[in-house]
Image: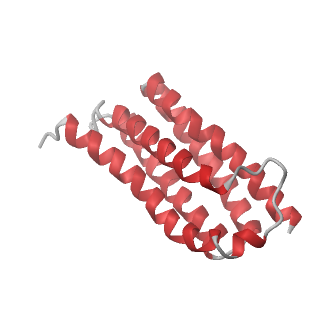
Amino acid sequence: MTINNSFKFIFAIAISQAAGIIGSIFTVSAIQTWYTDLIKPVFNPPNWLFAPVWTILYFLMGIAAYLIWKEGLNKKEVRLALGLFLIQLMLNALWSMIFFGLQNPSWAFAEIIILWLAILATLMSFIRISKTAAWLLSPYFLWVNFAAYLNCAIWLLN
């Protein structure tokens, strides 16, 4: 059975956005309560900035995954790359559960290091298949670097 590229594109975007929606379930309630009381670093962006940035990043991640998927699941390197993508996507949602849901910046920092490694592995696998896909994933990787800094700072300041 062949899946057409339009379906692949829509599904890849939807699955990426779904990770964001799952994460936001834990984030939204904590932003108005627990998170407001935390001491944050000087470079902490305003709260309103996170939702649009993450929405764009999830969209770019979905496009990147689509570009890999359309190369064909019959290729071992494509299956590996998409497997890594799904792992990092789950780790992404898990971070929100730990940081905001469990309100535990120390465990969230440990988890974001694992997430960072998973994104790096995904990027390395993507670049072998599609440089465009790797470039589309790069802003996400950079943002997670910044998020790791914020997470660590919040953990140390509180």
Q: Residue at x 87, y 63 (%)?
A: 156
Q: Would you say 151 lies left or right of 57 here?
A: right
Q: Would you say 156 lies left or right of 79 here?
A: right
- The x and y percentages for residue 158 are 85, 69
- The x and y percentages for residue 77 are 40, 35
Q: Residue at x 36, y 31 (%)?
A: 67
Colouring used for the render? secondary structure
| Location of residue 133 (image quadrant) | top left
**Whether residue 8 is situated above or below residue 90 in the rendered picture:** above
Q: Residue furthest right?
A: 157
- The x and y percentages for residue 8 are 26, 41
**Whether residue 4 is situated above or below residue 131 in the rendered picture:** below
Count all numbered tags in the image, as a single digit. 0
Q: Residue at x 51, y 63 (%)?
A: 23
Q: Residue furthest top?
A: 131
Instruction: Name the image quarter holding the N terminus.
Output: top left
Q: Nearer the viewer, residue 108 or 71?
A: 108
| Location of residue 138 (image quadrant) | top right
Q: Would you say 115 lies left or right of 134 here?
A: right
Q: Would you say 146 lies left or right of 88 here?
A: right
Q: Residue at x 47, y 23 (%)?
A: 131
Q: Residue furthest left?
A: 1
Q: Nearer the viewer, residue 16 or 53?
A: 53
**Whether residue 21 is situated above or below residue 8 in the rendered picture:** below
